Image (cartoon, coloured by chain):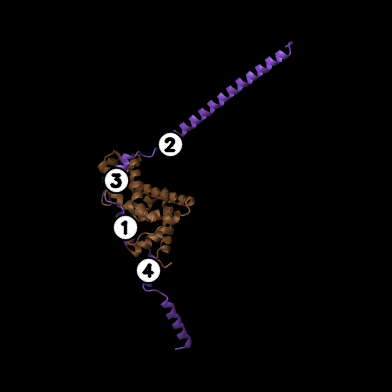
Chain colours: A brown, B purple
Amino acid sequence: MESTSPNALADLVRRAQRGDEAAQRELIVSYQHRVAGFVYAMTSRSDYVEDLSQQVFIKMIRALDRLQAPAQFESWLFRLARNTCIDQLRRQKLRRIFLPFGEEHENIPEPPGAVNSEELDALRHALAQLRPQDRALLALVQEGRSHAEIAETLNTSVAAVKARLHRAREHLREHYTPEHET
Amino acid sequence: MKPEDHAWRSLQEHASAQLRGGFADRVLRAAHGPQAETWRALQAHAAAQLRPGFAERVLRVAREFPGVPSLLDQFALCVGTAVACIAATLFVHSRNIDLENEKNLASWQQIAMEAHANDPRL
């Protein structure tokens, strides 16, 4: 969707809001890879990507008529994605309280070949060490969101975004060791 | 060369032998953090997890399964349930009080009749 002008995107969103299925499909196809990337950065789990991305887009379709500013669709969509991932991570944490072996079952390493490079594996490993809020912040920056847009997505101020981003980047660097020296 | 220079050199050699190959690259990568291409690889890996026909599946699920009720609907349901519970409690309470009153009245009538029978002056 990067190449689409804001006006074209707003028109597409308005059509989707009116229930035009072709427009809804176009929105999904345009954003599915970016949302998948965001979900993976948030959860570090390949097996969650399809399910959580699906949940994000189902929520998008059902809540689209409540979006008042079609121009802010992208911020709104990534807020949905962030909230969906954080809910999933919370549920996972809650399950661990009741299921003593949950953590072992959930932290099954990715099968060989699932991640195709040392750097990617290191990035996945480093992201997994951060708080979900920091992962969301870094993933939104990689999405090309501006500080103002991120502040809007996270319901916070631009100054707070800058400060948190600085800390999140430092933490990521601390944990980013491509050969897992630690 | 002074004897301590030789010792220093040995120490340095021993220390540098501890560093594995590619040390400088690792330091640079750790210092700069993940590069843009690593983030792109992450996104590409994630995108590859979506099975073909993803959009169709999303649209089908959204069509076939009813959505989650809105907050207003959930609130209305809560209020309705609370009103029904209060009404049921009040009904049961007032019914119990009426039954208790009838029972007490009957007992007092019984007592009055018995008193009347035992004392002809009343």
> Quick one: SS at disc 4?
helix
Q: Give the SS element for disc 2.
A: helix
A91 vs A111: above or below: above
Q: How many marks?
A: 4
Q: Which residue is mark 2?
A: B74
Subunit under mark 4: B
**Along the polypeptide, which appears first: circle 3 or circle 1?**
1
Q: Tell me the subunit letter for badge 2.
A: B
Mark 1 / mark 4, whichever is N-terminal: 4
Q: CA distance from mark 4 to mark 2?
A: 54 Å
Q: CA distance from mark 1 to mark 4?
A: 24 Å
Amino acid of disc 2: Gln
Numbered label attached to residue B57 = 3
First along the sequence among labels 4 and 3:
4
Q: Where residue A105 sits in the image (x, y, percent)?
A: 42, 55
Nearer to us: label 1 or label 4: 1
x, y (%) of residue B83? 49, 30
Residue B12 in percent (x, y) is at 44, 80
Name the residue rendered at 55%, 24% in the picture.
B95
Of callouts 2 and 3, the N-terminal one: 3
Which of the labelled discs sits on residue B45, or is there none?
A: 1
Mark 4 vs 2, N-terminal side: 4
Q: Residues within 10 Å of mark 3 (few under 14, many from 20)?
A: some
Which residue in the structure is indicated by mark 4?
B28
CA gap between label 4 and label 3 equals 44 Å
User: On the same chain: label 2 and label 1?
Assistant: yes
